[in-house]
Image (spheres, coloured by chain):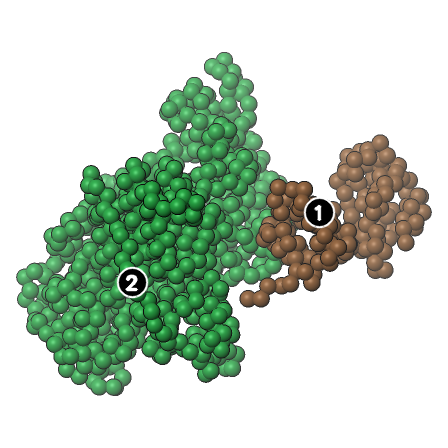
Chain colours: A brown, B green
Amino acid sequence: MSEPAFIDVLSQAEIDAIEIEVAHLPDRPSAAIDALLIVQKHRGWVSDESLAAIARLLGMSAADLDSIATFYNLIYRKPVGRHVVMVCDSVSCYVMGGESLMMRIRRHLGIEPGETTEDGRYTLLPCVCLGACDRAPVIMVDDQLAGPLAESDVEDVLGAFE
Amino acid sequence: MARIEVDGIVFEAREGENLLQACLSQHLDLPYFCWHPSLGSVGACRQCAVIQYDDEEDERGRLVMACMTPVQEGARFSVDAPGAAGFRASVIEWLMENHPHDCPVCEEGGECHLQDMTVMSGHTTRRFHGRKKTWRNQDLGPFIGHEMNRCITCYRCTRFYHDYAGGKDLQAFGSRSRMYFGRTADGVLESEFAGNLVEVCPTGVFTDKPFSQSYSRKWDLGSAPSICPGCAVGCNISPGERFGRLKRIHNRYHGEVNGYFLCDRGRFGSHFVNAENRLRRCGVRVGDEEFQEIEGLEALAVLTDLAGGGNVVGIGSPRASIEDNFALMQLVGEDQFCAGFSSDEAVLNELIVDIYRSGAGRVPTPLEIENSDAVLVLGEDVLNSAPRLALSLRQSVRNESLRLAEGARIPLWQDAGVRGHAQGALSELFSLTVLPTGLDDIAAHVEHLPPEQIARHGHAIAQAVAGVGAEESASGRIAAALKSAKRPLIVSGTGCGDGEVMRAAAAVSSALRHAGSDPALLLTALEVNSLGATLLGGGLGLDEALKRLKNGAADNVIVLENDLYRRADPSLVDAALEASRRNGRVLVADLIETRTTANATHLIPVAAYAETLGTFVNLEGRAQRFYQVFEPRAPVTSAWQWLGEAGRAAGRNDMRWQHFDTVVETCASRPGLEALREVAPGADYRGAGGLRIPRETHRASGRTARNAHIDVHERKTPVDTESPFSFSMEGAQGGAVGSARSAVWAPGWNSNQSVFKFQDEVGGALIGGSSGIRLFEPAHGVPAPSYAMSQTSDEGEGFRLIPLHRIFGSDELSAMSPPVVERGGAAEVVLNRADAGRLGAREGDGIRCDLLSASAALRVDDAMAVGHAGLVVGETFGWLPRGRVVLSRDPDFRSSQELIARE
């Protein structure tokens, strides 16, 4: 059986970055989450091929790595748009109007949570907590928090992300 | 021991054991899901909640999980308290929210732990009216069906498959309410123990696929205690039958042999019993004509005729019971009887018995090896030749983590705690084998060597144990580890076909004994009754027997359940059978059609293991009885009955056997086989109230209707004159010794989890003791024997052949089971890259062995030593010549896939 050449799947930059993380850890599989995030940073998401390649690089089974990857909401196992819009649906934001904020964003983008706009610009995801209750209702676009957010602010805030 | 009180009942429990286990050991009803006696506690499912009271005054108590609560002197608990019962009912209700309403069409229905627990906790009305989550199921191969919608997220599947059995391709994906248990993509589950998921899963997520395709409810399956015929481990099994077909195999608990688990060869390999190529008619033929069907009485007359004179050779079989072999031996006379092994294998099996008897080491039970804290495997690919042992060896390396946990005062049943604390620390397992094996991933030291070098290495280890030789070498390090271990274990066997390897294993064990330790030594044989046939003996070697036929010293041959082409040089077999066909008769009694039956003059169909009763002797020398599960259709009859009838008809006083028990009695008069009498209850044994033990369950349905398409009158129930079991639902299980129980069931416990009701304590022996009797014990008090390395020369042209075994395909009978055929691989020749290059062959090319007139696809593996060729034993390669053999590239070879593609 010929082994898939994972070197071809992962870029040298990705491999180098992962190896730096590995060097700090007691064993290679311990770098699983870092490795997934590194590949996601380079490609936007983690495909089956990438996952298999990372697993080989770290000396673990694809199933073991995938069980980690799928456990975390912020590791994307499907392609996402250029910008990921996370809307908090936890208690504080719910009390402060998070539900109607989500409704407004859905209407504005024309997609349901979990979907990506046709132009590939936005992916909308619900999120359990962003750790920013003082700014409820809050959303996060890529790595930028926005809140407290009025429904009327939605267009401007999202529009800033090309 | 600690005295504890549960709902006013005071009983003794082991100090520190968990309360769930303590309650179950008292046979109390306490629901659970995620706990399993072999997997320990993780406290995940919250189903075994009970109330614990602080002291006598405490009336409120607090809710604790029984599986996570250690038992302490004076502790007081309640299972029935409303707070606990209500909590458990709520937990079930949550679990059931997403569980489908598909019990009527679910294979698990009627033996579902989830059904049992739901009923037990009183959740009978659904309040949840929302949408249920649904999932896409995966194709997991020919063995296991997948229905994720039924999952209740207990994690038992991954804890067994991944943590316990070391499988890499089944995992838990997602989080919260979106958990999925499966593979990363559709595909065959890789673990050789995947079939246990069927029993480990508390509901119907993982099901027995072949069983689903020809399904019956558990309560409609007839059964009797049986022994797996797949290899020499002798796992206890419970075959289920309906309408005269073997439907499925379930594990039958044995506290010393197989515990709760089977391998997939055992679970899915028994469908040969229903196979198309079963021999079902008596036949005769003249010359090269087709076989003509004859009546049973006519066939019996031929057999009787052969019983009269001495001009006959009888060839028995290691896949037939001791009694069947004995009956043939009795019929033809000891000096004309051959046990049916290849002449080389006969020597190896006798060597096992000799080494065991010599006192080189203690012979452990198959489950006992789990306790070993240092293991040396010499030459044997255990996962492929005695698969169930590999699962036990995998547990043995966990002893280091148990030791660490003890030091940290973590209870050993705290599965997650023990594993987390150990951080993957393993006890040492040293593996010296021909090629990589399925245990290499847990081995501290792995070497891949040809058998003669393994033997040399083994002897060097023995010398290092005795203090001779360099301590810096690998041998020195292995010797030191074995010496410092509390419970060292040496495993070897006949698999690689070299007695010197087993002798080296005995030398290591012997040296350890000299050094003052108490080593266990387990040697594996290849077939279910290899040791039984060896102990029975017989005056003839197979080559000698065949030569007698070839040169006319004997004209007739009776072959019992044996394909001689897998045991001896095919050209010798051809010559012998041809001479015998010319001069006399070739009578073959078998249960399947083989190359040997094709070369017979007379055919007699005999019963498969599930259709008769008998005794097999496993690799530790344990004689175990298997009982008839169902009656075969005439003229298929037990071999001992055919042979006994013939002996009686021939007027032989020594064969006046009325019943099976008399055969056992006569057989037990042979030296070394005395204990056969005590192996299992005889035909006069009765269950509770003096009643027979029913093969059918008390809920068996359609008794008057199941044959109505043939005859509307209810059939008379056959009378079993040979065993304590009845062919009906009447009778009593109760009172039967555990080993004579046809099924496990207890009120409220319809699944196989009910086995705890029949154990002395959870995970202990069945009530009445573990079944089977060891026919011999190692010599005690004698000095450990010494084993020196014998010198062999290995010069010459060509390749030295090494037999390679495969869990799926190498065992003759299971290789005919359709699901195993689908799962198994084709024959292979394994060569080193350099040797492949010299033959001008590449991976996948055909490699021909002219001597065997056979070709198989090449697999290149650099672990194979230069000058050696590994041949996968099976239909293509059975008997392998000793000495060097010329191999060549076969330009005309087409792999089976290619042939299929062409068609």
> Which quarter shows the N terminus of chain A?
bottom right
Q: How many labels does the image show?
A: 2
Q: Is mark 1 on a helix, strand or loop?
A: helix
Q: Mark 2 sits on what residue?
A: B792
Please name the amino acid that badge 1 sits on: Ile
Q: Is residue A34 above or below residue B275?
A: above
Do pointers 1 and 2 mark residues of a single chain?
A: no
Q: Which residue is drawn at 46% across and 58% down?
A: B436
Could you say which quadrant of the image residue B746 lies in?
A: top left
Q: Where is residue B309 in the image (x, y as percent from the top left)?
A: 7, 72
Q: In this view, does B188 lie above or below B743?
A: below
Q: Where is residue B594 in the image (x, y as percent from the top left)?
A: 31, 73
Please name the amino acid that badge 2 sits on: Thr
**Looking at the image, which is closer to me, A15 or B654?**
A15
Q: Position of residue B445 (x, y in %)?
A: 46, 49
Q: Mark 1 lies on which chain?
A: A
Q: Mark 2 lies on which chain?
A: B
